[in-house]
Amino acid sequence: MSDLQEEGKNAINLPMSPASVEIHPEDTLLEENQERTVIDPTSRDDPRFKELVKVLIDWVNDVLVEERIIVKQLEEDLYDGQVLQKLLEKLADCKLNVAEVTQSEVGQKQKLQTVLQAAQELLRPRGRALQWTIDSIHGKNLVAILHLLVALATHFRAPIRLPEHVSVQVVVVRKREGLLHSSHVTEELTTTTEMMMGRFERDAFDTLFDHAPDKLSVVKKSLITFVNKHLNKLNLEVTELETQFADGVYLVLLMGLLEDYFVPLHNFYLTPDSFDQKVHNVSFAFELMLDGGLKKPKARPEDVVSLDLKSTLRVLYNLFTKYKHLE
């Protein structure tokens, strides 16, 4: 056993390798051609990595609150498929044909196969390459588990904001011809919010922000003039697009004015005091836009609430395009 552990440490600490990575005994006990990944400690200590893990744990617990399931550590709580099953059933509003409790490794992997197959059928149409396997999830590979959760969160448009550009350095240990070999790779866990949400196509606002920021003030001024022409009827005035639409109230009222109807006050929060209430308001405004024949907004409600100017401009420009000639 001690020889195996020493062999594993030597494989990790090759010349020209980054700083030493702590290897646990189980990480060196590999079958031929089997591999295991170890996250570099510096990556584990990265604030954005920690934030990503915390955001995902909180999200899973929020989704499963009615199941009275509390996840504390992703590797230990998700590897056997039990929590993943409940999570996917809740997100997709479906029932998976699996045994409720499985203690054996074979039973756990059978459950994981069913759960991951169902996840794959949902996620593959979005063009993502799957970055997890039954063995990696069951082997408590945190990187694989994070890839899966990020994919589920983005696919189901989770009301969370994932930290952008999170990458980790991992050491991949593989056994070949009886010897352990290691390599260091960078795993990208998140990109930008827009790319993760599947909006790969660029539009005029991307170009505006990237190449013509001087014209941004002109666009903002035109949109402010447009919204105030209608909101002034309620003695309301907008001066800052970045902040005044973030709680959704003005968006809801604006839709009522543009479509010429009164929005019942019980349908939204007139003075929202939490992130969730603001998201509710913006989401409700989006529903009114769809009812009015507009396309589904490209932005996410959470992005508008989070003061993302580009998202707010996209929503307002969508309204401007349809209603600009309305008096």
Image (cartoon, helix red, strand yellow):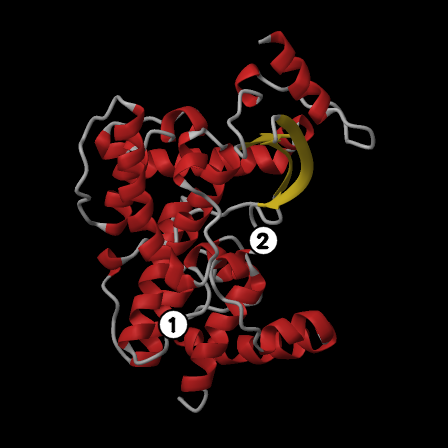
Q: Residue furthest front?
A: 177
For numbered disc 2, what is the local secondary structure? Answer: loop
Quarter of image, res 133: top left
Quarter of image, res 308: bottom right
Q: Is residue 81 left or right of residue 162?
A: left
Residue nearest the observer in this picture, 109 or 268:
109
The amino acid on which the numbered mark 1 sits, given as a three-letter code, is Leu
Quarter of image, res 4: top right
Screen quadrant of the C terminus: bottom left
Residue nearest the observer in this picture, 14 or 159:
14
Q: Is residue 316 left or right of residue 222?
A: left
Screen quadrant of the N terminus: top right
Relative vertical location of residue 302 with respect to residue 90 in this rendering, above or below? below
Classed neighbour count for the residue bearing mark 2: other residues with Cα under 10 Å, few (<14), some (14–19), many (≥20): some
Question: Residue 284: x percent and y percent?
Answer: 31, 62
Question: Residue 69: x percent and y percent?
Answer: 28, 28
Disc 2 or 1, which lies upstream in sequence?
2
Which residue in the protein does label 2 denote?
191
Number of marks drawn: 2
- Mark 2 vs mark 1, foreground winner is 2
At 34% across and 65% down in the image, what residue appears?
285
Note whether residue 270 is visible: no
Q: Is residue 42 left or right of residue 137?
A: right
Residue nearest the observer in this picture, 185 or 245:
185
At 52% across and 37% down in the image, what residue appears?
143
Residue nearest the observer in this picture, 17 or 92:
17
Q: CA distance from mark 2 to mark 1?
A: 33 Å
Question: Residue 70: x percent and y percent?
Answer: 33, 26
For numbered disc 1, what is the local secondary structure? Answer: helix
At 70% across and 78% down in the image, what residue appears?
215
Which residue in the protein does label 1 denote?
254
The amino acid on which the numbered mark 2 sits, given as a three-letter code, is Thr
